[in-house]
DNA sequence: GCATTATAGTTAGCTTCCTAATTTTTAGTA
DNA sequence: TACTAAAAATTAGGAAGCTAACTATAATGC
């Protein structure tokens, strides 16, 4: 994810416009600010999780397991849900297993498959983290009121529909 | 950066709410959607850049150099502007130098310092990429009108002010 | 003038992500 | 039944990020 600290101002973009006249300055500013703020929020979340000895990728896997009734899932399903490759999921699960937060159970019916189970320690880890996380998130989002929140979701949905533009 | 494909719906969040009553469901949905859309935009940008044999980190360095009047800067300054560590910048510059897009010039006045210069090939690379990039960005952002754009920037600014919440 | 401190950059070792190739097992078909 | 397909997971190799430690050079201060 792009981590831009020094976003271009109007002056810089006007300089670029002389070399690249197709630039729409407002479009660029909005796009970069969106990516920039999201990136900073993500880094903030990282910092928060690191205090609990967690990282975003691993933490998200724990949450996905917590969603399941028996706290079990499979690497493929987890990869799909979290939007990473199965290879990446293998690495995340390696880390979580090393820390005892999940365990792998070979499926005896189909030996290609592995069941992933959230351990007691994994549940405990989430119980430590989530209340604090939800409380901070509530504070963060309290900065924007109901109308602003709805407008934000609306804009995000429109951008999501336009994602194919990069194809 | 969190890459969530399977965002929680209301039903899942209500399940979590029974275990973690502090959850503000709207706050969580807005936050995750913001990070999710930003992440997808970032991946779209990656895909686009890959077609030009570029990656986000390296591309951003080229742009920062293009901003400068003589196309020159220093590793420290570039690291600061792009929000990565100096160690990471060393790696990015290694890659760019290997491809001939930048070159390193030792500063004879202060031999600790290195000047980084955008080569002709580096300029050419940007000239290949930027018009297409700006044109697509214009299309992407055309989905949102003036008022929506201003509301978005407003919300982003408020969230940015609240970043310390994760500290 | 020389010892200490600060600065710029790199190196080393780790994590998390990727794609592509490989292994093992199951399913489908001729 | 045996051969081929498909599927699940892992491994291999690479990029981009981090922190911490190191090297070389410059600046400071007694």
Image (spheres, coloured by chain):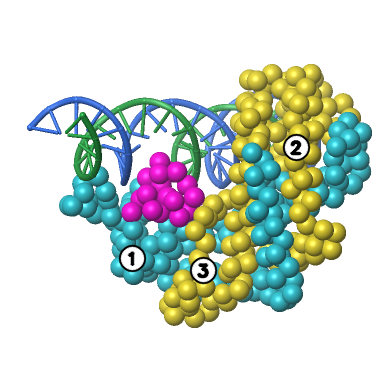
Chain colours: A yellow, B cyan, C blue, D green
Circle 3 residue: A9
Tell if the residue under mark 1 belongs to the same chain as the one under mark 3: no
Chain letter of disc 2 in the image: A
Q: From the viewer's perspective, is A112 left or right of C8?
A: right
Distance between mark 3 and mark 2 Cα atoms: 34 Å
State the quadrant of the N terminus of chain B.
top right
Callout 2: helix, strand or loop?
helix
Which of the image's four quarters has the C terminus of chain B?
A: top right
Q: Is residue A11 left or right of residue A104?
A: left
**What chain is tagged by disc 1?**
B
Please give the name of the residue rendered at 69% of the width and 19% of the height, measured from the top-left corner.
A100
- Asked which quadrant contains residue A98, the reply is top right
Label pair 3/2, CB-CB below 8 angstroms: no
Which label lies toward us, 1 or 3?
A: 3
Question: Is B45 left or right of D25, judged from the image as shown?
Answer: right
- The answer to whether B127 is drawn above or below residue A117 in the figure is below
Up/down of C11 relative to B37, above or below: above
Looking at the image, do the residues carrying marks 1 and 3 touch, with CB atoms under 8 Å apart?
A: no
- Give the magenta range: B74-93
In this rendering, does residue B107 appear at all?
yes
Q: Is residue A110 magenta?
A: no
Q: Which mark is residue B71?
A: 1
Q: Secondary structure at mark 3?
A: loop
For the point 36% across and 66% down, the residue is: B68
Does B7 sit above or below residue B54? Answer: above
Q: Nearer the viewer, residue B64 or D2?
A: B64
Residue D11 lies, in percent from the top left, at 54, 27
- Rounded to the nearest angstrom, the CA distance separating label 1 from label 3 is 18 Å
Q: Residue B84: within the magenta?
A: yes
């Amino acid at each position: 994810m792009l981590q831009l600290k020094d976003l271009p101002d109007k002056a810089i973009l006007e300089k670029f416009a002389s070399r690249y006249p197709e630039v729409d300055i407002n479009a660029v500013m909005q796009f970069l600010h969106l990516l920039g703020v999201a990136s900073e929020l993500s880094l903030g979340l990282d910092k928060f999780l690191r205090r609990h000895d967690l990282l975003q990728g691993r933490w998200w896997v724990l949450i996905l397991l917590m969603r399941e009734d028996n706290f079990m899932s499979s690497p493929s399903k987890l990869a799909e849900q979290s939007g990473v490759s199965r290879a990446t999921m293998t690495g995340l699960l390696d880390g979580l297993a090393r820390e005892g937060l999940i365990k792998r159970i070979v499926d005896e019916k189909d030996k290609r498959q592995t069941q992933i189970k959230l351990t007691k320690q994994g549940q405990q880890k989430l119980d430590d983290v989530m209340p604090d996380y939800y409380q901070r998130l509530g504070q963060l989002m309290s900065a924007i009121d109901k109308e602003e929140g709805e407008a934000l979701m609306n804009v995000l949905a429109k951008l999501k529909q336009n994602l194919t533009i990069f194809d």
